[in-house]
Image (cartoon, helix red, strand yellow):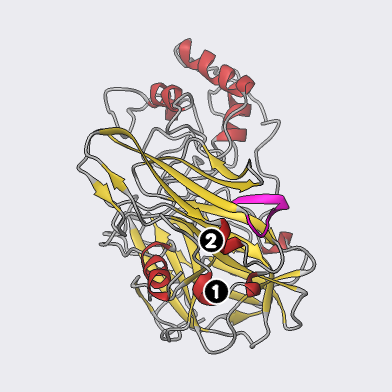
Amino acid sequence: MPKSVRVIVLTTCVLGCGSAEAERDTLDTCVDPGCADDGTTSATASVDDTSPGTDGADTQSDAAETTEPGDGLPCDVVDVISRNCFGCHSDPPKFGAPMPLASHADFQVPAVTDETRPVHEMVAARVVDPERPMPPIQPMTDADRTVLLDWIAAGAPADASSDCTPTDDGDDGDVGPDALPCEPSHTFLAHAQGSEEAFHVPESGADNLYMCFTFASPFGASTQATAWAPITDDERVLHHWILFRTATAQPDGGVGPCNMPGDAVFVSGWAPGGQNFVMPDDVGLELGGDTGSYILQVHYHNTAGYADALDRSGVALCTTDTPRANTAGVLTLGTLNIDIPAGAAEATATGTCPSQLTSLLPTPLQTLASFPHMHQRGRSFRTTITRGGVESTLVDVPAFSFDNQISYPNDPPIEIRAGDTLTTTCTYENTDGPAAGFGERTEDEMCFNFVLTYPIDIIPEDYRVCMTG
């Protein structure tokens, strides 16, 4: 792949294209596996500093938080809400969720998106919506869905006598630096300009705010990441973050609207429901050495207008200066050739990484995870591997949502072998919009799969985008 195409791809699509004014891109609205909403949605990298917000608590507000649902809800409904909804729809809500689902009263108020209908009616519609299901990541079990729908069909009655504790609060406690099997050595955190103080999220004008925090690389030439975990500080306003590295010098301790350089490379990302990531024992993630910079892009939703929103969210990494046997990095699949007619009920874009190119692989690639990316028209996403005339699946997202984009890990890793053909197919719906093609704006479209794979160093830098068509 010519370098010019690689630069275009990284400039416009590695989840870094967007400022508060430019676009509402990537992972927009709460994406906890338990979201059942009503349809809305140091100046340098510090070392051995994982204290801010590592427990996921709201460290900036004195407001009491409801730690489990109840207050008039039947106990079987409490169990369902705890497992499926309460990760975002606590009281107060977290991660951009529009309202709490903590009490019977919360289900009776007018819905944010349709004030003529109560929240419980919208919840009933969303849990069976095939295109925008709630929860968006891990669907409810049939049994949980039946309990919730039967209660709503009965008029969502209160149970004033209920006094119950959820049998499962949906929190397995395995996310965050304390849950890593190693001691984090570096953190990249949101911060004030040129300071290690928390970033003050504006009280107004931050309904959909992308801010970028920049750092000089703190890593040595041979440093690799072995594991990483999210640090979530002010969960009232945090929506998601993405960490990039770049060879383009950035101000150490800089803060401002995002303006991503063309060579920015996706390193890691998090959204509600995201987990810690631990590399295999013999694999380390390339970090680019000591000559580049890092950019932490954070998406904020201060829709409630909190005046005291002070945030130090970001990522904690475990690293090693002794390179592991295998080096991992990102291979980009997909296509730039997107043509979606106006009024189309269904349109597809397909790109291939052809066998002629994969035949040059001296050894198989081991794919650890996929990160599919489309925009608002995206409806389904799939990457397949064809080998010897037999097709297998690398990643399949039958109900893709622009609002809920996550990574899909492979355990065990999936091999890409010499001679394989990788086909990425994106499906779009455009019944009420003008014709659209490839572009970085939300009203444009994309079709990319960012694949975390190793050994990445067998692929030259200029060929880590593999697509034709």
Looking at the image, residue 261 lies above or below residue 347: below
Is residue 436 among what the camera can see? yes
- Note whether 33 is above or below 325 in the view shown: above
Q: Which of 73 and 422 is in front in this view?
A: 422
- Residue 457 occupies quadrant: bottom right
Residue 116, picture quadrant: top left
In the picture of the structure, the residue carrying the numbered disc 1 is 188
Tell me what residue is drawn at x 59 percent, y 42 percent: 67
Label 2 amino acid?
Gly
The answer to if 418 sits in the magenta stretch is yes
Say what secondary structure mark 1 lies in.
Answer: strand
In this orientation, which residue lies closer to the viewer: 433 or 129?
433
Q: Name which residue type carries label 1.
A: Phe
Q: Going 49% across and 75% down the picture, which residue do you hit?
A: 462
Where is residue 365 shown, x and y percent of the image? 68, 62
Quadrant in the picture for the C terminus:
bottom left
Residue 283 falls inside the magenta stretch: no
Q: Where is residue 129 in the image (x, y as percent from the top left)?
A: 44, 26
Q: Vertically, is 467 above or below 81?
A: below
Q: State how many labels appear.
A: 2
In the image, is residue 257 above or below residue 109?
below
Q: Which portion, as a residue range, is magenta? A: 406-419
- Secondary structure that dominates the magenta span: strand
Which residue is at 56% across, 22% downward? 145
Where does label 2 land, which residue? 269
